[in-house]
């Protein structure tokens, strides 16, 4: 019964002989690990001869909280795996111990089973044949508990440490601040630091932990290698926090704190987007109503009223006149025809692509009929609400590089076509200025910190399918100035490398002009196994959502090279030390600059020092960055290039709808925008269940849409849900506020 | 051409003889008043013989920006008044001069015509008969310009000045902060200051400027009488800011700064309400869907899942069991019948009263059909969106006095009835904790300041018809501690005294336990005139939205007395000095403690010193406060009491719908809540066009609803619009951001 020792980056298991129990626990966890002695009478069959009916018994035994099996290859079948209830599978475990049956050698224990405070019962054959098990049960702290146990430094202290001037920050509460864009002007001659992207391999539905790696990496760089560094993360959508998802601030000892502030409201950026998005939506329908119920003259008189006897066009109306080719500035000089052209947008309601949004998982708003009150005089139509982060304004926020640019993008956003097929924009509706005013604070990146006090920008979180899934250009730019030439900025791309990284390169870097120095590709053994033909993640695989073992492949960036790296890394059945070594070896052989395991989840920055060194070395080697395609190519060619070079498709196939949209956008002058593929992230192909490296498939493009303000065309590969729902038992059942301490409970 | 002198509280006009022009301008305004020389060739007919066709000519003359007429009684007819275009009427003027025709004596010039920088052209008969006018045109600064010209003190400085400890504030940007409720515990032994309500007489549609009086009064108390004071204001709804309304931070030299922060987002409280409100709405529909598509057992297993082998009720579920009379804590011990009772809320969709909300003027959401996507399996229904401030959660926020109480109120909110007619609450849906978490920051009052640096709490802004229209209890309570026993807290009630003040007394004071020491009743001459039978406010009356002349009646509070005071004040045709004296005299004769004119709009606190003295004296006289009705009376009796004692109705008349709702609420145990009348604010009666003191009317109650969490029953008198729309030319056309200076333009 000797406690093992947890060292940075490695685990040693001692005392595994006979019927002994071995408690794996690092000393540094003692403060927060609550030990509970728990008795169980579970009688388990012995290794290798374990029968399905015994698993079924375990299913019903409420005293067994989870079961991880190490079984020989010949008993490894789906039938065995499927017998175990999902809730007994370690994948679903948060607060339970793991019983390791049999007597594996220490080096055979899957490292990913072991979490802070995990009880590993390493029992002999004899003991199991009929004896009783008295495991020690440990409750490792939840992410929220870890977050709460740390006292963040005051954000003004952090701001001073990273060199912000007093008038460059706007503090929000104790631990958040907005950073003003004026800083970019002050530091315009400062050379940028190194720019590192964290991307992931094609993930399992549980995610690969890119945020956690990002946070762990900056913690390692800053606290352990003494290199200035900054993490740039996406702001999570608040709606799903109350549904199935829980929080999203990293995890374990690599997270952004306070995690409840990160996950709820933050500084209101998404709320601002909601307000701006919906003002535009209201303007569209109201305009249609007013045009339908008023004569040209009445409309014109209301749009250009005589105020205090003076009748003049507002500047946004002068811009519209110019667009219409009417070179007049006196409202009284317009001909009747010109008045009609000016006053009527003639929006074709069937072409409206601008939807209302809410930051709530509200499935009943997926398809609705609006305008049914008598005051709307029968002009009802079908519409929908999307989740707020799916708004084009979120993509605009993420891609803009200044206030001027944001205003122009907001004005350019196309919301519908008119009855002649011409695009109608926010500018045409006269709402550009108001949208900009609503977004004037949202444009400033939000400063927070990691659990180890490293600076983090949390800014923008566009959808990774219908948008480009990357945090903001502005946060990256400001961070690159702040860290100095020798410093590092680590930014994260959503979904797998085929989506998030590809869009980072071809959309975000095109918008920002920045060139990444290195890419970290996160690959959990769990995902590698799944792609190797193992069963789905909800089954009994010895890996966990909360595994701290992640293989991070630090690569020099080269878009054409990355595909093989995400997929050639081979599959192993259990993630023992030997396995990890194998994965790293294979990754390097496949062209990775380096491949190292990380342990930031369980021990913070110290667990990612090896990764930090690799990243530092890779970034200093110089990069050979180039875009995958020329934006001047026809839309179809750009789509085909991505499908073939990135997804490995043989070709693409356009629906008639898609073809006609491509023709329309090209005719409207939007043909030279980059492409933002809306594709599942769960496979390189369009079919989520096609794991590994699908070959020879034809990628079907069902429709094509455009985000002109954000600046991309997005082809739809299948249907993308833009409004999540709530499950039967949403996580809000567990979320509560302690009214005494004012602390949040139940977020994870 | 001698500039006049502007003194505190009085205006003197000099040099009015002959054909002279007299520029009325206080020296203190010079800094921000932009003078523009403007030439006009307007030829105007002379006083008394002015013909309608001459007015029509002026209508079309773009060089005349506004016209105010002083005409003899025998030419004063609706025909003359209606001839002038509304936009030429001084009521609509903001940036224009006022041409005063004829040669009135100085004391006859309506004071309310005169604004900072107003050009008053006082021309002779001869001059007008054919001469040319060359008026000087001045642009008085807009509210936004005044706001911007002042540099607010840093909010941490303000916080220190008012005695807040460092850990009692949470700063939001440079000039806003949230104040933590822990302060109430620290200062629990501190005696409260004096508590003053600002209410208005039955207003015109343009409002009476209660916020402006409130701000002016605390500016006068603090800066000029040296008395600690605090203003407590409602947070305005953001949606209408982009429609027809403009900003709402007071006006002129009595406003809260920065006004754009006040009007946009603030610290996100309304956004938090939107999020909480809509999470509950989504939970209702999703629950109905899940109940309709699952068996009792499947539902139960999902609601009380086995997590890591343990199956237990969450605390919110235990509360539900208790409510159902099931005294069990083991999920496996429930009978089949109990499982059904527990798992099914059996919501009757036709009884759902909980609506979704948005802080956007979106008329197309007034009536909608939701749930039309195939994923919702046909469970579509009719629903609506309200403006966010109409959410019951806003009323809860305004009435709560602690975190514990807010959580209880949120849980108590009734969203529908079940199929047995029993109320279904947020608690039944399991969402209480999550709502509280979303509202945990919103509960903290927001500290801002007036133009003269006086502290202001801006907190909560419930609708004044379907809710009670008062700012938060918590802000008042905290402010009363902070000002000290000799200090003053001035809080404001929405709409006219018949609504806002009545609800302040009978709902807000009942919830808070606070007793007001004095009431200031704001009465503009404009409104007094309207109630006296003058034409509507859009016509040619010499009063302006931006008049700085307000008659404030400082009264000792006594609910039974206030009615006569709002209406007995007599009507005069022009608001000359003589008129004001008359109004004040009449008000005092009618029982007002004092009646004084105020000039805070044009000169800030200095202009309200007389009012501040009157308020100080009134408050020190002690009050005779009592509630209008006993909450234990039957609902009908309470409604009748308000209708008769406050509105002057002969009786009430209940629709069958109203009667059946009253019966249901009484049966459900909600009979002893106070009453919150949902009535027009434009008349004491239910008919907006019945001005003055309507008599002998029967108040029709069309329906009755309940806000159980907020804690009141609200009878509907007529239909209340809970979702405003956008006009043909919304004010967003004028709203813009200067991307160089980052300053907002066009808010007013």
Image: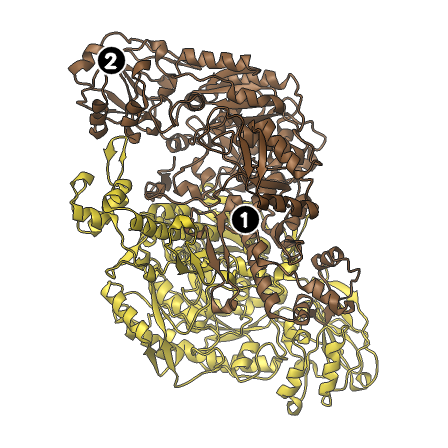
Chain colours: A brown, B yellow
Q: Nearer the viewer, residue A664 or B31?
A: A664
Q: State the image quarter where residue A259 is shown.
A: top left
x then y, percent, for residue A629: 67, 31
10 Å crowding of disc 2: few (<14), some (14-19), many (20+): many
Q: Quadrant of the C terminus of chain A?
A: top left
- Quarter that holds the N terminus of chain A: top left
- Element assignment for label 2: loop
Q: Is residue B374 visible?
A: yes
Rendered position, A42 above or below B226: above
Secondary structure of the residue carrying numbered label 1: helix
Report which residue position mark 1 lands on. Answer: A272
For the residue carrying disc 1, how many other residues have a C-alpha within 10 Å: few (<14), some (14-19), or many (20+)? many
Residue A520: x and y, percent?
55, 23
User: Which residue is depicted at the point 44% across and 17% down?
Assistant: A571
Q: Position of residue B17 (x, y in %)?
A: 77, 82
Identify the residue under disc 2: A123
């Amino acid at each position: 019964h000797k406690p093992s020792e947890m060292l940075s980056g490695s685990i040693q298991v001692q005392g595994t002989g006979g019927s002994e129990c071995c408690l794996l626990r690092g000393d540094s966890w003692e403060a927060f690990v609550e030990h509970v002695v728990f008795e169980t009478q579970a009688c388990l069959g012995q290794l290798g001869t374990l029968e399905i009916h015994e698993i079924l018994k375990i299913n019903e035994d409420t005293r067994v909280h989870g079961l991880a099996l190490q079984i020989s290859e010949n008993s490894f079948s789906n039938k065995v795996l499927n017998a175990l209830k999902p809730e007994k599978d370690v994948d679903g475990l948060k607060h339970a111990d793991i019983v390791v049956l049999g007597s594996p050698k220490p080096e055979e224990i899957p490292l990913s089973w072991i979490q802070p405070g995990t009880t590993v019962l390493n029992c002999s054959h004899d003991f199991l044949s009929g004896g009783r098990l008295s495991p020690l049960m440990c409750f490792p702290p939840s992410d929220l508990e870890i977050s709460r146990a740390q006292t963040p430094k005051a954000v003004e202290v952090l701001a001073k440490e990273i060199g912000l001037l007093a008038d460059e920050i706007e503090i929000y509460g104790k631990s958040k601040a907005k950073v003003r864009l004026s800083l970019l002007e002050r530091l315009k001659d400062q050379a940028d630091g190194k720019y590192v992207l964290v991307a992931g391999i094609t993930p399992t539905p549980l995610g690969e932990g890119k945020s956690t790696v990002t946070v762990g990496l900056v913690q390692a760089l800053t606290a352990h290698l003494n290199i200035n560094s900054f993490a740039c993360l996406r702001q999570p959508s608040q709606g799903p926090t109350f549904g199935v998802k829980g929080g999203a601030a990293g995890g374990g000892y690599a997270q952004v704190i306070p995690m409840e502030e990160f996950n709820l409201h933050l500084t209101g950026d998404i709320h601002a987007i909601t307000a701006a998005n919906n003002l535009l939506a209201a303007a569209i329908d109201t305009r249609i109503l007013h045009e339908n119920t008023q004569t040209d003259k009445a409309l014109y008189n209301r749009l250009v009223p005589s105020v205090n006897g003076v009748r003049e066009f507002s500047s946004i109306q002068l811009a519209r006149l110019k667009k219409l080719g009417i070179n007049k500035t006196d409202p009284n000089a317009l001909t009747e025809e010109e008045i009609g052209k000016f006053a009527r947008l003639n929006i074709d309601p069937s072409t409206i692509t601008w939807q209302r949004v809410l930051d709530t998982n509200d499935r009943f708003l997926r398809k609705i009929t609006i305008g049914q009150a008598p005051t709307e005089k029968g002009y009802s139509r079908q519409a929908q609400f999307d989740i707020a982060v799916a708004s084009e304004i979120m993509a605009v926020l993420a891609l803009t590089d200044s206030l001027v640019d944001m205003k122009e993008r907001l004005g350019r956003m196309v919301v519908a076509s008119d009855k002649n097929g011409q695009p109608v924009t926010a500018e045409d509706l006269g709402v550009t200025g108001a949208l900009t005013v609503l977004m004037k604070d949202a444009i400033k990146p939000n400063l927070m910190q990691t659990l180890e006090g490293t600076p983090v920008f949390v800014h923008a979180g566009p959808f990774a399918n219908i948008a480009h899934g990357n945090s903001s250009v502005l946060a990256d730019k400001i961070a690159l100035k702040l860290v100095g030439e020798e410093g590092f900025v680590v930014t994260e791309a959503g979904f797998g490398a085929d989506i998030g990284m590809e869009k980072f390169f071809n959309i975000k870097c095109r918008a920002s002009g920045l060139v990444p120095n290195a890419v970290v590709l996160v690959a959990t053994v769990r995902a590698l196994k799944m792609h190797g033909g193992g069963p789905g993640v909800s089954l009994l695989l010895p890996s966990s959502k909360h595994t701290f073992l992640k293989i991070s492949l630090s690569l020099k960036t080269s878009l054409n090279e990355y595909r093989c790296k995400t997929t050639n890394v081979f599959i192993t059945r259990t993630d023992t030390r030997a396995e990890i070594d194998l994965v790293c070896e294979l990754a390097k052989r496949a062209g990775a600059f380096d491949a190292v395991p990380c342990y930031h989840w369980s021990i913070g920055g110290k667990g990612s020092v090896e990764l930090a060194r690799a990243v530092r070395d890779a970034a200093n080697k110089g990069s050979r960055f180039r875009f995958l395609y020329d934006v001047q190519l026809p839309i179809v060619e750009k789509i085909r290039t991505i499908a073939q070079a990135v997804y490995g498709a043989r070709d693409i196939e356009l629906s008639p709808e898609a073809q006609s949209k491509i023709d329309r956008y090209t005719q409207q002058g939007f043909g030279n925008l980059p492409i933002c593929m809306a594709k599942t992230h769960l496979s390189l192909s369009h079919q989520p269940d096609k794991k590994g490296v699908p070959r020879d498939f034809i990628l079907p493009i069902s429709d094509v849409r455009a985000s002109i303000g954000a600046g991309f065309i997005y082809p739809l590969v299948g249907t993308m849900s833009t409004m999540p729902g709530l499950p039967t038992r949403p996580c809000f059942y567990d979320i509560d506020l302690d009214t005494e301490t004012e602390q949040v409970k139940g977020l994870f």
